[in-house]
Amino acid sequence: MDCIDTQSFANSENDINLNASRYEQLEDKLKYKHKQIEELSKRFKVLVEDFTDVIGIIDCQGKIMYISETSKK
């Protein structure tokens, strides 16, 4: 009959539980950060859409990332 190294098995099980716990923590953190981004995006849009001036965001390559609705009127 084969011997099972119970210590290695216990360590493997602990590692699995630890990884599962870390995964859940990262998943929760990612959901929280995503929610923060959505809230900031909504707040930004409310601010810039009330302006009569044209507001735009351009990245370092010159690509337009955002342009306010005012520019379309």
Image (cartoon, helix red, strand yellow):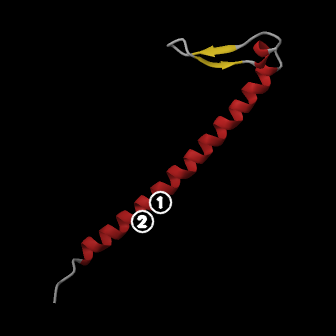
Judged left or right of residue 32, residue 43 is right
55 versus 34 height, above or below? above
| Quadrant hosting residue 34 | top right
Q: Which residue: 60% across, 41% down?
A: 33
> Secondary structure beneath disc 2?
helix
Residue wearing tag 1 = 21
Residue 69, numbered label = none
Crowding at dot 2, Cα within 10 Å, few <14 / some 14-19 / many 20+, comes out as few
Q: Residue furthest front?
A: 72
Number of numbered discs visible in the structure rendering: 2
Crowding at dot 1, Cα within 10 Å, few <14 / some 14-19 / many 20+, comes out as few
Residue 71 x, y percent position in the rendering? 76, 13
Residue 17, numbered label = 2
Out of 9 and 68, give the one closest to the viewer: 68
Q: Which residue: 45% across, 61% down?
A: 20
Type of residue at label 1? Ser
Type of residue at label 2? Asn
| Quadrant hosting residue 19 | bottom left
Residue 58 x, y percent position in the rendering? 59, 14
Q: Which residue: 83% across, 19% down?
A: 50
Mark pair 1, 2: CA separation: 6 Å
